[in-house]
């Protein structure tokens, strides 16, 4: 049996983009060495500010945040990203830590908006399978949003919705 291919980003046809935000070089290289060969494009950030800026600009498909990012930390960055209207709510954010996690840490991560909290070292196969699942769900949500008839911000018909509604009204008038 062959493994399923990674879904491509609809708008560009490129592989899924992962924003990897970590000041710990060994941790970032470890994740990079797992994801790169699996077809993921990796974008790196080393500080909170870089992570926020690159998330807004690049619109990644997955964000991996080190909980020990310098300045405000991964939890604060996660909260800021979840509150950012420029970042899709369907973008999975995964917090990572260099040591074992406690129940309290996992709960704090979930409350901050993370979908998972991983401890290093990660199991390579599990990491890839989990990310594939998250990426597929995110791309499906993006596709549904793109095909929607309503503008998300205003709740009014978008161009596609207006066109469809005009066709419906024209059909009704014709009958």
Image (tube, rainbow, N blue to C red):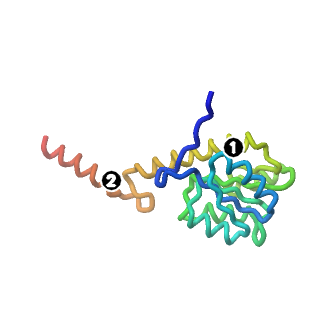
Q: Which mark is residue 89?
A: none
Spatial CA distance of label 1 from label 2 is 36 Å
Residue 87 in the image, given as x and y percentages of width and height? 56, 61
Quarter of the figure with the C terminus: top left
Q: Are there few (<14), some (14-19), or many (20+) residues within 10 Å of tag 1?
A: some
Front residue of this view, candidates 113 and 30:
30
Q: Quadrant of residue 66?
A: bottom right
Q: Classify residue 78 by image quadrant.
A: bottom right
Name the residue furthest front.
Answer: 37
Of residue 121 and residue 30, the one placed in the foreground of this image is 30
Q: Is residue 105 left or right of residue 175?
A: right
Considering only vertical position in the picture, is 52 above or below 12? below
Residue holding disc 1: 128
**Where is mark 2, residue-wise?**
160
Q: Position of residue 9 (x, y in %)?
A: 52, 51
Q: Quadrant of the N terminus?
A: top right
Which of the pair 30/87 is nearer the observer? Answer: 30
- Looking at the image, residue 70 sits to the left or right of residue 170; the answer is right
Tell me the residue at 44%/58% (across/down): 152
Residue drawn at (65%, 61%) of the image: 43
The image quadrant of residue 133 is top right
Does label 1 or label 2 sit earlier along the sequence? 1
SS class, disc 1 = helix
Residue displayed at 78% across by 65% down: 23
């Amino acid at each position: 049996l062959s493994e399923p291919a990674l879904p491509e980003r609809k708008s560009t046809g490129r592989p899924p983009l992962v924003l990897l935000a970590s000041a710990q070089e060994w941790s970032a290289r470890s994740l990079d060495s797992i994801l790169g060969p699996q077809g993921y494009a990796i974008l790196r950030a080393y500080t909170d500010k870089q992570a926020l800026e690159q998330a807004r600009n690049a619109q990644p498909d997955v964000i991996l945040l080190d909980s020990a990012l310098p300045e405000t930390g991964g939890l604060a960055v996660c909260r800021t990203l979840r509150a950012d209207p420029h970042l899709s709510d369907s973008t999975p954010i995964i917090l990572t830590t260099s040591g074992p996690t406690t129940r309290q840490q996992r709960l704090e991560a979930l409350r901050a908006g993370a979908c998972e909290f991983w401890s290093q070292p990660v199991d390579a196969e599990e990491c890839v399978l989990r990310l594939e699942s998250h990426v597929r769900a995110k791309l499906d949500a993006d596709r549904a949003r793109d095909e929607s008839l309503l503008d998300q911000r205003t709740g009014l018909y978008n161009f596609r919705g207006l066109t469809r509604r005009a066709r419906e009204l024209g059909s009704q008038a014709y009958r």
